Image: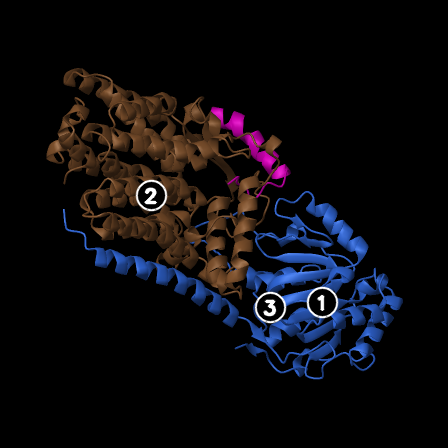
Amino acid sequence: MPKITSRSLIAVSVAIVVAAILVVVLLDRYGRNARTYGAVGAIDSPQVVRMVVESPLDAYAFWKQQGFKGRTILLIADAWERLGIVNQADIPSARPYPLRLYHIPTTFEREKLSPANFLYVAALNGITRRVVAILSQPGYDDMAAMAQRATEARIGAGELYLPHQGFPRWFTTLARFRGEKEPVLLYVNASYFRTVEPEDLYRQLKASGVATDAVILCRGGEDNRLTNLERAKLERFARLIGIPAAKNDSPAAAPAARPRQ
Amino acid sequence: MTSPAGMDNIKNPDTIGPDRATAKTGPRRYFLPMLLLLTLLGLFSRQYLLHSQPVSVDDFSVGLTAINYVESGQLGPTMWNHSNLCGILVYGAMRLFGTGVVGLKGVSLMFGLFSIPLLGLVARRFMSESAALLASFLWTVEPLAIDFSRQAIGDIYLAFFPLLGIYFACRYRESRRQYWLLAAGVSFGCGLSTKWSVIFPLAVTLVLVARSIRKGREESGACRAISMVHCFAALVLLPLIIYLLTFIPWFGRGYDASEWPALQQAMYRETSQHTGYHPLEQDYRDHWAYEWFVRPITYEDVYANRDGNGQEGLDGSDGRMTVLLAVANPLVWLAVLPSLLFAAWQGIRKRDEGLCYLAGLFLCSYLPLALAQRPIWANTALSVLPFAFMAVAYSITAIAGNPVTRQRIIAAYVVAVALTTAPLYPLVIGKGFELPYLKDYLEQNYADKLQRMRDGGAFPSGGR
């Protein structure tokens, strides 16, 4: 049996401890560096890209075009669109070798992207790594009821954590929203103004101190549940944050995002 | 090469059983050739007609999941709640060998194959060589081990990596060369990065190694303390590092270290409450771990494939049905609990650390599953079976003191297991429909089941 040298044991033990710390630190840095941001400011800051779009698909196209990666999306809408069965990865019934496997994110983007699943596809494609949803009270109550049956949900006072296959999703109401620590991609759907006035939303968002580099206001496209009144309120909100009335911006107008140092 | 059992025997002659004296002088001439022979038998049984075994929904999903995880850091679509070393390895294999059978299933096949000699080498450290060979034989012909060596999904890793870690830990215990302990840490880390259940054999091994350090011959208490710290670093921190590294693709999505615990928590919640992908009351497969060793059980994969004529669809309505049916051999599985009790009793009575370790490995691996409130399908038994089979092999070889009688008992048992397992082999490799004596049985029992699963929207299927 070889003589054990304490010095070598200490050296190896220290090396393992240092390696463990290094791995954590490097993974942390790696993750943070993977995020890309544009010019950041308050929701009504001139340097922040702000636009009104017709459809959620326009929002997706803008985020994609800007090269946003690893971001928090702050969704403001009346209710949460649930994912349908169509969002499962297709398994062909003929599976001969060599298998014709595919890349789920790009396939979904090409073949399945819709106003109902644009956030999911944004998650698949790495645009967002977490979603915070500010819903109306009925929309929140609906999610809270669903969360009662979910295995992964954590329900707090006016705040709900309901991840989807490990993807973090937070749900809350405007009254409970306390801001975000990092700049968000803000997306406001006209449906939110079914129960809330634009001035209230503007005031609360300003008070929360939320920072962003892209504000997208969505008129809702072909969503026939939306009324002209809600779209008019969306225009009012647009003016509050400094977007000229009825101006639909082209997604190409903004400068590309960059990694944040 | 002297086994710990052999070393113990030398130190304490009272513990030498009639069939353990062999361990004193290193491996007998027949041990390694026999192990090689079993490995060759295992190679045949695990790869025979594998290329023509239709690709299951799970197999295909594993390929998708591998690409999804490595290229996008996205967990899922299959088994998102488990850490994803399987996806990383399968992805690497597919990059090397393409998306054929080798790329998709080569890793499972390799681990399933290597686990055969590994089990023998590990068992030899706790018991006689004839017992070790018997344990290895039981594993070679075990339908569940064959089944999952032929599937892309990573359940067979749960047998391979803990065995590898245990083997290295035993080598460390014998030689005190620290690279064995580091290798054990890496092996257990790979196991943990497959499924968390590997934490149980890791914990037992940690206790074993710590105990041997405490009883060791280091010069001073300080040296022992340093060895303990080293042991902790190698068997706790090192696996944790490996585990963390398998999350590199996930971090690449922009997550930072503070978000990682929330993911682990979500994975834990899903794992602890998982009830399958279709209603449990419609799941007719055996799914309670406490039943594994008290009544005959099976594990089945039922799926349909269309021929590869270019037509694709999701319903599989006119596809060819495949049933992969792993039937646990009652001669082996029902012998597990009494054998384990016998081995534990012998271990305590003779103060045999190896047998106590074996009993600890089995109990710590099995009890959390047996006591779980959620359903656990028989595929998970692969994390327990190597220890169970070692206990069975030990008991069979220790029944008689007389060597001649003992050899006869072993031979009779081997023949009985082989005869009862052989008819089950076509079922495991999905060829049951091609044999008249099985075809009627399968059609009667599984055609309706496939239809029910299809009607219930159970594709993609699986209950892991």
Give amino acid for label 1: Pro
Give amino acid for label 2: Leu
Per the image, the residue denoted by label 1 is A56
Per the image, the residue denoted by label 2 is B206
Mark 3 vs mark 2: give the one in front.
Answer: 2
Give the colour of chain B.
brown
Residue B204 shows in the view: yes
Query: Residue B78 appears at what percent x and percent y?
Result: 52, 48
- The label on residue B277 is none
Please tell me which residue lies in front, B423 or B238.
B238
Give the colour of chain A.
blue
A51 relative to A223, above or below: below
Please tell me which residue lies in front, B199 or B217.
B217
Q: Residues within 10 Å of mark 2 (few under 14, many from 20)?
A: many
Per the image, the residue denoted by label 3 is A71
N-terminal-most mark, 3 or 1: 1
Q: Quadrant of residue B419?
A: top left
Discs 2 and 1 share one subunit:
no
The residue at 70%/77% (across/down) is A42
Residue B180 shows in the view: no
Please tell me which residue lies in front, A112 or B16.
B16
Q: How many marks?
A: 3
Query: Residue A67 appears at what percent x and percent y?
Result: 58, 74
Over which residues does the magenta segment extend? B441-464
The residue at 74%/54% (across/down) is A158
Mark 2 vs mark 1: give the one in front.
Answer: 2
CB atoms at circles 3 and 1 under 8 Å apart? no
